[in-house]
């Protein structure tokens, strides 16, 4: 019964996360229509939070489905639901304020939730996951007091934002506000919550670094996946905030995709699905990135060099585009093989050496007929390429 209830809750959480971005977009449109104001960045933010929420809830649900009670799975689901709920709360608040006025109870609840949910959701979804990753425990008992202090700061911040009056521009009166307080108290609570999240993020970095330094085997492989995804997000997110026009939207999309990779990497690490393919993933990512850059540069140079000669002969730019495209298509496989070999030699050395050892053994096997020599050579090749802890070789006896 408990298992069935748990699975129903997980399916419901996943359904809510999937529905959230669609509901958020519809409510944002209604808010735009009611107020006569539009903001494309709000729409993009709603969609981005929705995609991140679907990814995190999906990964967390799979973790909890496979490993009930796993703390990392709980953090992913709770944090994602808080974040996606915030993306729904704000358009509700804007719409109800414009339609029903300053004392509308639904607008009041939505504003309260929106003020408090985002930073708490970010805290649960990212720093807390980093602090408890991968085993669901703090790095050591000495971390209990600092972590409890951060949680206490968030609780105090939530209380301050609950009992303080809201600024007049919100258009809604906080019925829980205490007499004599000013909106500055709520601003203080928001700043305290932001400070708590910042301290928690620093604690997560220290926790991951501490674990990585002393980790071996499975834990080291788990931390590699997590560190790689966080590092990519840490590069792209500041760029998305620093640029606001033109191709910045592409950076925004890339930053959201990078953030979605964090729960995906966490899921791979916790469930240990293809855990030791990390070096191969990094190698392929770098190789295809380099190949793309080389081919784009080749395409651009080909157009630049052939533009004038072909224009004087054919007078048609389509011929230039076709020839440049054929050139790039013909170069793809040779360039990819060469770049992949170079990158594997640096970033996937173990697989590169293993492939080279196996190839050398196959070359020697063509000319060898003595079974004892072949067996000894096979034993040495496997030990060198795979480095097993134990190994046995069975040979079937001949009929004679």
Image (spheres, rainbow, N blue to C red):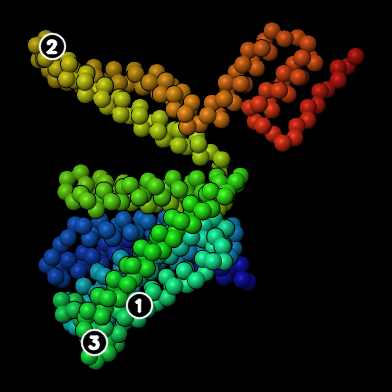
Measure how far apart labels 3 and 2 are at the Cα level.
77 Å
Residue found 38% across the figure and 73% down from its top? 154
Q: Are marks 3 and 2 in contact (CB under 8 Å)?
A: no
Residue 395 falls in which quadrant of the image? top right
Q: Nearer the viewer, mark 3 or mark 1?
A: 3
Q: Depth check: 303 or 141 in front?
A: 141
Q: Are marks 3 and 1 in contact (CB under 8 Å)?
A: no
Q: Determine whether the residue tagged by mark 2 lies in a helix, strand or loop.
A: helix
Tell me, for residue 235, which label it has, or none. Answer: none
Which residue in the protein does label 1 denote? 158
Residue found 35% across the figure and 77% down from its top? 158
Residue 335: image location, x then y, percent: 38, 20
Question: Is residue 340 among the parts visible in the rendering?
Answer: yes
Q: Depth check: 368 or 241 in front?
A: 241
Measure how far apart labels 3 and 1 are at the Cα level.
15 Å
Q: Which quarter of the image is occupied by the N terminus? A: bottom right
Q: Determine whether the residue tagged by mark 3 lies in a helix, strand or loop.
A: loop
Q: Which quarter of the image is occupied by the C terminus? A: top right
Residue 226: image location, x then y, percent: 47, 49
In primary-sequence order, the first of circles 1 and 2 is 1
Q: Nearer the viewer, mark 1 or mark 2?
A: 1
Residue 79: image location, x then y, percent: 42, 65
Q: Is residue 309 above or below residue 148?
A: above
Which residue in the protein does label 2 denote? 309
Q: Is residue 285 above or below residue 400?
A: below
Measure how far apart labels 1 and 2 are at the Cα level.
69 Å
Residue 180 falls in which quadrant of the image? bottom left
């Amino acid at each position: 019964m408990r298992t069935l209830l748990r699975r129903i809750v997980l399916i419901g959480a996943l359904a809510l996360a999937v529905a959230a971005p669609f509901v958020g977009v519809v409510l944002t449109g209604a808010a735009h229509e009611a107020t006569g104001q539009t903001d494309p960045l709000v729409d993009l933010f709603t969609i981005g939070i929705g995609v991140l929420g679907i990814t995190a809830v999906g990964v967390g649900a799979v973790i909890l489905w496979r490993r009930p009670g796993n703390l990392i799975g709980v953090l992913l689901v709770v944090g994602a639901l808080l974040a996606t709920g915030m993306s729904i709360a704000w358009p509700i608040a804007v719409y109800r304020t414009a339609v029903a006025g300053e004392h509308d109870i639904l607008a009041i609840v939505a504003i309260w939730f929106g003020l408090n949910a985002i930073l708490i959701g970010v805290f649960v979804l990212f720093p807390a996951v980093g602090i408890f990753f991968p085993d669901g425990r703090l790095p050591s008992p000495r971390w209990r007091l600092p972590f409890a202090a951060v949680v206490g700061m968030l609780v105090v911040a939530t209380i301050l934002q609950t009992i303080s009056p809201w600024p007049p521009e919100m258009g809604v009166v906080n019925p829980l506000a205490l007499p004599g307080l000013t909106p500055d108290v709520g601003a203080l609570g928001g700043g305290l919550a932001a400070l708590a999240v910042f301290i928690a993020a620093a604690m997560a970095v220290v926790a991951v670094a501490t674990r990585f330094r002393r980790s071996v085997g499975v834990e080291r492989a788990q931390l590699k996946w997590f560190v790689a995804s966080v590092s990519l997000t840490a590069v792209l997110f500041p760029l998305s905030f620093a640029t606001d026009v033109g191709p910045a939207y592409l950076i925004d999309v890339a930053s959201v995709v990078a953030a979605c990779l964090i729960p995906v990497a966490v899921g791979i690490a916790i469930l240990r699905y293809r855990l030791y393919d990390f070096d191969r993933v990094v190698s392929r990512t770098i190789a295809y990135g380099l190949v793309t850059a080389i081919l784009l540069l080749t395409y651009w140079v080909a157009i630049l060099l052939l533009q004038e000669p072909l224009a004087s002969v054919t007078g048609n730019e389509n011929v230039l585009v076709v020839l440049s495209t054929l050139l790039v298509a013909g170069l793809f496989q040779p360039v990819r093989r060469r770049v992949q070999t170079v990158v594997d030699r640096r970033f996937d050395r173990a697989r590169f050496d293993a492939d080279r050892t196996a190839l050398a053994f196959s070359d020697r096997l063509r000319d060898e007929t003595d079974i004892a020599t072949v067996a000894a050579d096979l034993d040495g090749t496997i030990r060198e390429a795979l480095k097993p802890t134990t190994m046995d070789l069975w040979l079937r006896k001949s009929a004679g």
